[in-house]
Image: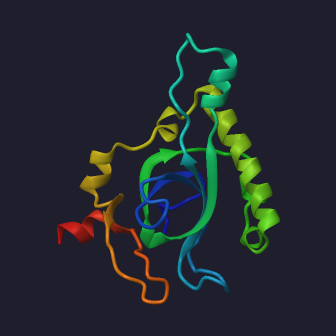
Amino acid sequence: MKFLKVGRVAIITRGRYAGKKVVIIQPLDSGSKSHSFPHALVAGIERYPSQITRRMSKARQAKRSKVKPFIKIVNYNHLMPTRYTLELEGLKNVITNDTFKEPSQREEAKKTVKKSLEERYTTGKNRWFFTPLSESFLASFGIGLVWVTQAFTDRSQGFRVLLRALSIADIVT
């Protein structure tokens, strides 16, 4: 797709990271050998930085400015592009399809993504990217998770399984 280019900020609409903002690192329109569908390699924020004030100490400000990143291969159907772009220099060489084959490579890639995102956050650029989306915004698109208890008996163990996640669209219909 011509609008899903490198640096475009998108929102993930399904799965574990539903409602999280991501940056497209490498779009693959025709797919690849391991993933035959059109997809993108993305880097996003799993845990956004907390708010800081002037009264806080430098150590506390540094702690609250931390970002927890994730990297993922996402189907185009599960991405909602935004009008924003974010240039993260050097990440295209770090994250490739080969990165996801070995856990140690993935962890190294996450560390470099974390470093570049925290650097971008501390300089004050792209403030919108580092703020979580409101729940009302997510609900209007049917994104997000609602936790519902669903109890059923496991015959072999004899205990109850507690939680199951449903999307808001499943509850409405």
State the image coordinates of residue 59 (x, y, percent, origin top left). Answer: 69, 21
- Residue 49 position (above or below residue 77): above
- Residue 52 position (above or below residue 77): above
In which quarter of the view is residue 60 placed?
top right
Visible residue check, residue 101: yes
- Residue at the far top in the pictured view: 55
Q: Residue at x 55, y 73 (%)?
A: 39
Q: Residue at x 64, y 36 (%)?
A: 66
Q: Is residue 108 left or right of residue 23?
A: right
State the image coordinates of residue 50 (x, y, percent, origin top left). Answer: 53, 32
Q: Residue at x 56, y 12 (%)?
A: 54
Please tell me how many numbered marks the rendered image carries.
0
Q: Residue at x 64, y 60 (%)?
A: 71
In which quarter of the view is residue 143 placed?
bottom left
Visible residue check, residue 90: no
- Residue 4 position (above or below residue 83): below
- Residue at the far front in the pictured view: 158
State the image coordinates of residue 133 (x, y, percent, origin top left). Answer: 39, 44
Q: Nearer the viewer, residue 129 or 142?
A: 142
- Residue 130 position (above or below residue 20): above
- How is the rendered protein coloured? rainbow
- Residue at the far bottom in the pictured view: 156
Q: Is residue 166 left or right of residue 87?
A: left
In which quarter of the view is residue 153 placed?
bottom left
State the image coordinates of residue 171 (x, y, percent, origin top left). Answer: 22, 68
Q: Nearer the viewer, residue 115 or 58?
A: 58
Q: Is residue 158 left or right of residue 141?
A: right
Q: Quadrant of the C terminus?
A: bottom left
Q: Nearer the viewer, residue 29 or 170?
A: 170
Q: Nearer the viewer, residue 78 or 163?
A: 163
